[in-house]
Image (cartoon, rainbow, N blue to C red):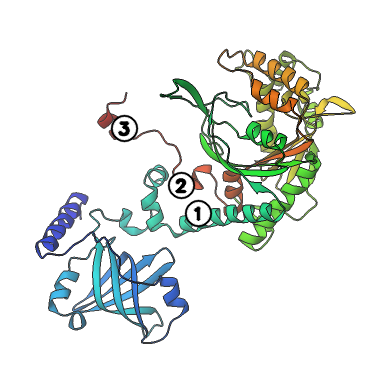
Amino acid sequence: MELNEILRQRRESLSSLRAKGISLYTAKVPTHIFIKEARDRFQEGRKASLCGRVMAKRLHGKAAFLDLRDSTGKLQAYFKADILGEQNWAIFQEVDIADILAVGGELFKTHTGELSIKVEEFVILTKSLQPLPEKWHGLKDTDLRYRKRYLDLIVNEELRRVFKQRTQIIQAIRKFLDNRGFQEVETPMLHPIPGGAAGRPFKTTHNEYKLDLYLRIAPELYLKRLLVGGLDRVYELNRSFRNEGISRVHNPEFTMLEVYCAYADYEDMMQLVQDLIINVAKKVLGRTDFTYQGKTIDLNPPWQRRSFENLVKEKFGILPEDQAETMLKKLKEKGFAREATKLTRSQVAKVIEEVLEAEMDTRPTFVTDYFTDLCPLAKAKKDNPLISERFELYIAGLEIANAYSELNDPLEQEERFRKELKELQDDKRLLDEDYILALEHGMPPAGGLGVGIDRLVMLLTDQPSIRDVILFPLLRPEPSLIKKTGQE
């Protein structure tokens, strides 16, 4: 049947039911239990009231079977004309797949052993004017799945599992940190100065103050202000925003965990993130070994370490003391960054990291010994000021975490900020003088850790793209919507 004909019939059904005085978008749901509870506490003949969406409808003369599904599971509903009565059976004929019903009756098992409910009464709670996609076998078009996430959730049980596990992962992270004495905090999303990372910000304006503001790139500088204020162990599960490219592992709006611990360093953060991820995997998956995109991942320690300094020296001949121009020349000699004419050190680092990321094996790997000039917020090593106390954690080629021994020398921090601003050559980026002032009041030595929650969820739920673990990823507007709104 053509879609237009289905839509016409559904609207006719709506009109027919309303003509009979039936309310189809009811404001109050009758007392009911969830389907999982009905299954868990099943007793033959027990009365129950359930609510759910119709996922399938099978007619057998004066009887019918419907599959009802709520957020906890699916159950078969048995409708019979002589039980419902002539009037209610006529109303039942107008029930379509995707409608939402409340049903009441006795629980029983069919001769095949399927748990069912023998419906004695029912109410149409919501009339669906649209059919389910592709005859209810699920959305195949990936772009459509992201745009119509509500439809994907209706028909895709695997997707519902992924987002249930995402919630469990975040709950496990909170519990782990709470049990270790960390305090969850909230810091501003609107920043007067973009900072805490080198990404390009989204800009907005506060009308009352006539003030330009930026959606946060990272909460780091505010969280470290809290260390100055005496909150020694803090964390924030935060939404951050970067006005940059979109890829399999990048979305402009994303979720991060940032953790700061006074009187600790990056070695402590290394142990913390290892303990955290192992704990979360055990809580959510029940094990520490699993498969990600066909690769076997084993989180059992020890996790390996690799030196960034040695990796780039072996692959590109790049040394910590090299200037940006020299680093770029060496990259080009190896066939990388051929189109670039000028790169800042941070951009060079990004090129290098993308190359190295593809070469990481499936064992969790801490990449250490980053060049200090690439880490403006990290302490340099005492025995080698060209190398910083920093690591990045890679698992299955995904960059999962980043951590420092936090720089708390206000004079050196100001010098590094000024150098970074000069490299960026962006007159709209300003020095965060208030943060420097906060450091001048004294910040204890500390370790800081950032974990990409979306990527961690990708890893633990075996999803290939960040869009598969974000309910509503950012997409280009559909052409029809652009036309309707007058956007060009």
Could you say which disc has been placed on residue 163 in the image?
A: 1
Residue at the image position 41 percent from the left and 82 percent from the top:
113
Residue at the image position 65 percent from the left and 36 percent from the top:
223
Foreground pick, 204 / 39: 204
Q: Position of residue 58 (x, y in %)?
A: 27, 71
Reply above or below: 304 against 348: below
Type of amino acid at the residue the image marks with label 3 = Pro
Which of label 3 and label 2 is nearer to you? 2
Q: Residue extending furthest right?
A: 383
Reply above or below: 46 against 216: below
Could you say which disc has been placed on residue 471 in the image?
A: 2
Of the two numbered discs 3 and 2 on the same chain, state the one appearing first in sequence: 2
Q: Residue extending furthest left?
A: 19
Q: Dividing the picture into quarters, in which one does residue 475 lie? A: top left
User: For mark 3, what is the residue?
Assistant: 479
Q: Residues within 10 Å of mark 3 (few under 14, many from 20)?
A: few
Q: Secondary structure at mark 3?
A: helix
Could you say which disc has been placed on residue 369 in the image?
A: none
Q: Is residue 469 left or right of residue 375?
A: left
Q: Secondary structure at mark 2?
A: loop
